[in-house]
Image (cartoon, rainbow, N blue to C red):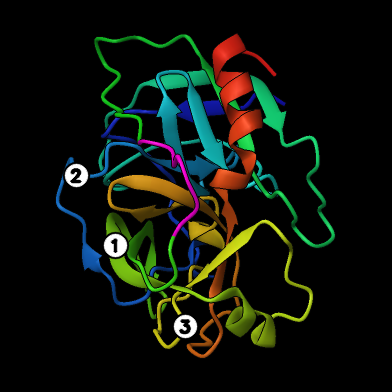
Amino acid sequence: MIIIIIIIIIIIMAQLFCELGSAIIDGKKAPEKSMLYMASVQNENGQHVCGGFLVSNNFVVTAAHCDVVLGTHDLSRVEKTVKYIEKICQHPSYNSNIRENDILLLKVGGMDNTFYKGQPIQLPTSEININEKCSVAGWGNTECNIVGELRVVDVSIINRDVCKKEWSNLPVNVICAGKGLYISCSQGDLGGPLVCDGTAVGVASFYKNKDCDTPNVYTDISKSLTWINKVLKQNDC
């Protein structure tokens, strides 16, 4: 199957269904062009499935459990430029059973700088601090009402020991955030970035839908930097 990537600010997309689109609940609208690294991972029918984000001019990060295609700010607009994935680079130690190392690099082919308006986000150089204020963004819905524009909400980083009380099989290389907030990333926002001070520190991996007492879980990007930098440097898996 050919996988298509849409990587400009304006894209066309089929209607999202509530059970697929799921949500940054009650977040605020992100200012236009404020998150040009964001990507919409879509299936072959043009339906939004997961989030993603640019880390270089020709690589996008998403969750390894997502099947892919991408876009950016407003999902209701009608202009588009289609790009193709040259290669899918799954983390070599990805464990689908527990979503350990749930991270994927997509090499984008055929970049046309005339139309390409994405802007890569910075990757971390160290581990994140507990209680640090961060943000998550995504498309999807509020209470199952379809929202085409990107929404964002603030979250705090949570201690791993606290997180393990809610997630008995918590993978090793993860970050927890968002306990006590009704903002569950649902399926449509998985794969998107956890952003702290302008740096993508995590990849949204899993959640408990509409459970404000359970933190959302993100793959810790700092634990995969050696692999990521190797792929980016050699421009290949």
Residue where numbered disc 3 is placed: 179
For badge 1, the amino acid type reads Val
Query: From mark 3 to mark 1, how far is it between C-alphas?
Result: 16 Å
Q: Which residues are magenta?
A: 122-128
Q: What residue is rendered at 28% in x and 46% in y?
A: 198
Residue where numbered disc 2 is placed: 34
Left/right of residue 106 with respect to residue 59 in the rendered view:
right
Q: Residues within 10 Å of mark 3 (few under 14, many from 20)?
A: many
Query: From mark 1 to mark 2, how far is it between C-alphas?
Result: 11 Å
Q: Position of residue 169 (x, y in %)?
A: 79, 74
Left/right of residue 134 with respect to residue 208 in the rendered view:
left
Q: Residues within 10 Å of mark 2 (few under 14, many from 20)?
A: few
Is disc 3 in contact with disc 2, using a CB cutoff of under 8 Å? Answer: no
Residue 108 visible somewhere in the drawing: yes
For badge 3, the amino acid type reads Lys
Is disc 3 in contact with disc 1, using a CB cutoff of under 8 Å? Answer: no
Is 125 within the magenta? yes
Query: From mark 3 to mark 2, how far is it between C-alphas?
Result: 25 Å
For badge 2, the amino acid type reads Ser
Name the N-terminal-most of marks 3 and 2: 2
In the rendered view, would you say 195 is above or below 40? below
Name the N-terminal-most of marks 3 and 1: 1
Mark sitting on residue 59: none
Q: Residue furthest left?
A: 31
**Element under disc 2:** loop
Q: What residue is rendered at 55% in x and 45% in y?
A: 222
Residue where numbered disc 1 is placed: 152
